[in-house]
Image (tube, rainbow, N blue to C red):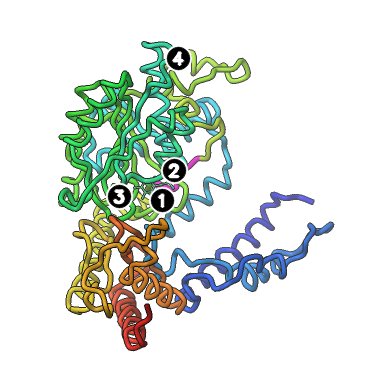
Amino acid sequence: MNPLDPGEFRRQGHMVIDFLAKYYENIEKYPVLSQVEPGYLSKRLPSSAPQDEEPMEAILDDVRQHIVPGLTHWQSPNFFAYFQTNTSTAAILGEMLCAGFNVAGFNWVSSPAATELESLVMDWLGKMLELPRPFLFSGNGGGVIEGNTTEAIICTLTAARDRVLRRLGHNSIAKLVVYGSDQTHCSFQKAARVAGIDPQNFRALKTTRSTLFGLSPDTLRKAIRLDIDAGLIPLYLCTTVGTTSSAAVDPLAPLCEVANEFGMWVHVDAAYAGASCICPEYRKFINGVEFADSFSFNAHKWFLTPLDCCCLWVKDPNALVKSLSTAPEYLKNEATESKQVVDYADWQLSLSRRFRALKLWLVIRGYGVQNLRSHIRYHCRLAKLFEELVEEDCRFEVVFPRYFVLVCFRICPSVVAGMSNGHIVENGHGEAWKLNKVNRFNAQLLRNINASGQVFMSHTMVEGVYVIRFAVGATLVSERHVIMAWKVVQEHANSLLSMPASE
Ligand code: PLP
């Protein structure tokens, strides 16, 4: 056996590329949302491993027959759910190079190119986003590619925690308080748990429609004051640009002003919307980032780069290093001791790390800044088109303002028989939303749409209102897909509305 025989690598590699090329050619033929039942795969594949080798032809055949039906096709142009994780030829080839070299560039000496390319690409990208110089290596800050936003928040929160605990002593950990809004992604809650923050000191501050679901600086200030009066210590604020539910934007500058007054660390989570800020017209959404301590966005969402690729910049890399560096004997080397190099293991949770910078480098070089901007703008135009289609049909309403490519809509309360408003009807049993006819109607509409397999959308609930989320962002999406998606929505609405009203 030679598991890295160059001839076989070439032959089998071509087969897989051909397989994927065909997959992309046919992707619209598959139901977007997988139609399989739980446990389907164990009925189709053997329950124990083969003793002898099997040919790639047979394996790919099984992928075609058994794996593809169990995929929800995230790269389908008819995928409009969640936020996309889009990909591209350049990035997939970058992934191949990464897997082919398979270096574990935990410190500089373990693979200088992996470290230096990451630093270079993060400065490139930082400049594309017009991040202030203190976030760039050239301004004594720096960027790192983490696996995901959750890791980025855990790392920065840990750095912030230790910065305070070094001053006040470890026993103060029970007094540390972290702040976000009720729209902040749940990854913040997970990060706070991992960082040892007392769950009672996790503040998900209420947002309202009056601030378009952005966190109000006054609300933050009041919460901080209450905590200080109770003898607690404000530690960390997680702001969001482009919340998961409705793409709301927290007002960064005034929030940073409040947080800075109390010596807190401010993180900006722009996981999805950050990519748009390479376009000058969208850059305004991160105005105020200059007053924050860290900023992250997921290139693996809307930047043509596949999972996993969360870009994190910090103004003070030393804060990360002080918390996350371990320096065991078996990793000691002259480069590290010279303090002239970056050792990225000290900026993240794990030791080993993939050469992820390659895919980002290939994307930026392979398409260039102008094309990347055009790609973002095209998606925004498509989202606007969908929004206009919704608005033209008086039975529907767009529920939140659209800043980027997420359109949140529903059938209007007045159209659902017997309801004159869309508010929750309490039944006293804690399942209020189930009693809400409008919500139930819209939920049924979404179920029917997705069951058709023609498109896939998702939902959220804000202030008790159930909305259907339509997020543009697939690499292959075009106008005809958006128009078709709207037709699917209308068809299912027509048939649902023509059914006798149920209580
Ligand atoms: N933050 C926001 C605003 C998100 O939309 C998401 C995911 O959609 C996350 C964080 C979680 O990101 P990850 O899966 O990279 O941890």
Residue 159 screen position, x and y as percent: 40, 24
The residues tagged by marks 3 and 4 sit, at their Cα atoms, a distance apart of 33 Å
Query: Which residue lies at the image location 35% right of the left edge and 59% below the top edge?
Result: 460
Image coordinates of residue 317 in percent, x first then y, are: 36, 24
Question: Picture coordinates of residue 122 (x, y %)?
Answer: 35, 37
Residue in the image at 35% along x and 74% along y? 441
Residue corresponding to mark 4: 170
Ligand 1 within 8 Å of the CB at mark 3: yes
Judged from the image, the secondary structure of the residue bearing numbered disc 3 is loop
Disc 4 marks a residue whose amino acid type is: His
| Contact, mark 2 vs mark 4 (Cβ under 8 Å) | no
Most distant residue in the right direction: 51
Residue 19, located in which quarter of the rendered image? bottom right
Which badge, 3 or 1, is on the more N-terminal residue?
Answer: 3
State which region is magenta: 355-362
Q: Nearer the viewer, residue 196 or 316?
A: 196
The quadrant of the image that shows the C terminus is bottom left
Q: Which numbered disc covers residue 300?
A: 1
Quick check: 264 left or right of 198?
A: left
Amino acid bearing label 1: His
Classify residue 53 as left or right of residue 134.
right
Can the viewer see residue 487?
A: yes
Q: CA distance from mark 2 to mark 3?
A: 16 Å
